[in-house]
Image (spheres, rainbow, N blue to C red):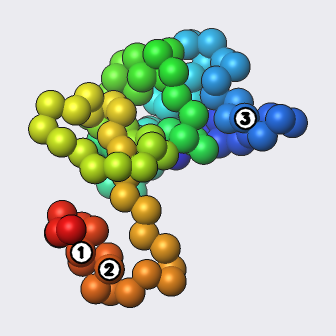
Amino acid sequence: HTHFLHRVDAARHPILLSRSYHIIEFDFAHSRRALSQFNPHVNYLSYPFGGYNEKAIEAAQDAGFHMAVTTVKGKVKPGDNPFLLKRLYILRTDSLEEMARLVGNQP
């Protein structure tokens, strides 16, 4: 996630969506630097509360991330934009078999 943009506004929208490119890039880079003290390979971003727009995508790239995950449900396919990756939703009520089926790309 990020440093200080991991919040929502009064309407429950990610605050990232209302910030300038410079604020977003600064926050992403700050978060990446802070996490790199634990692991020097901080290459992936999860957009806070799934909020992203063109500014956020560009800022993620410029902050040095290699990929970013959205909250759009679905599977990633070859050729997908690495800064707009979908995700599978696994619930705590899902069995290990259900999780294996989803991750294993089985019907």
Residue beneath the point at 33% across and 31% down: 83
Residue lying furthest right: 10
Q: CA distance from mark 3 to mark 1?
A: 33 Å
Q: Is residue 22 above or below residue 63?
A: above
Labels 1 and 2 touching (C-beta < 8 A): yes
Q: Which numbered disc flags the more N-terminal residue, 3 or 1?
A: 3
Q: Which residue is pictured at 64% across the width and 24% down the height? A: 17
Question: Along the line of sight, which residue is nearer the eye, 97 or 42?
Answer: 97
Residue 72 vertical placement versus 103 (above, below): above
Q: Is residue 4 visible?
A: no
Is residue 30 toward the left or the right of residue 11 in the image?
A: left
In the rendered image, which quarter contains the C terminus?
A: bottom left
Numbered circle sitting on residue 46: none
Question: Label 3 is placed on what type of residue?
Answer: His
Residue 47, image x and y in percent? 50, 39
Pointer 2 with pointer 3, Cβ within 8 A: no
Element under disc 1: helix
Total marks shown come to 3
Mark 2 vs mark 3: give the one in front. 2
Q: Nearer the viewer, residue 87 or 22?
A: 87
Q: Which mark is residue 101?
A: 1
Type of amino acid at the residue the image marks with label 2: Glu
Helix, strand or loop for disc 3: loop
Disc 2 residue crowd, few under 14, some 14–19, many 20+, Cα 10 Å: some
Residue drawn at point x = 46 percent, y = 30 percent: 29
- Viewer-proximal residue among 72 and 10: 72
Packing grade of label 3 (10 A; few <14, some 14-19, many >=20) is: some
Name the image quarter holding residue 19: top right
State the residue at coordinates (56%, 13%): 22
Q: Which mark is residue 13?
A: 3
What amino acid type should be assigned to the residue bearing mark 1? Arg
Q: Residue furthest left?
A: 78
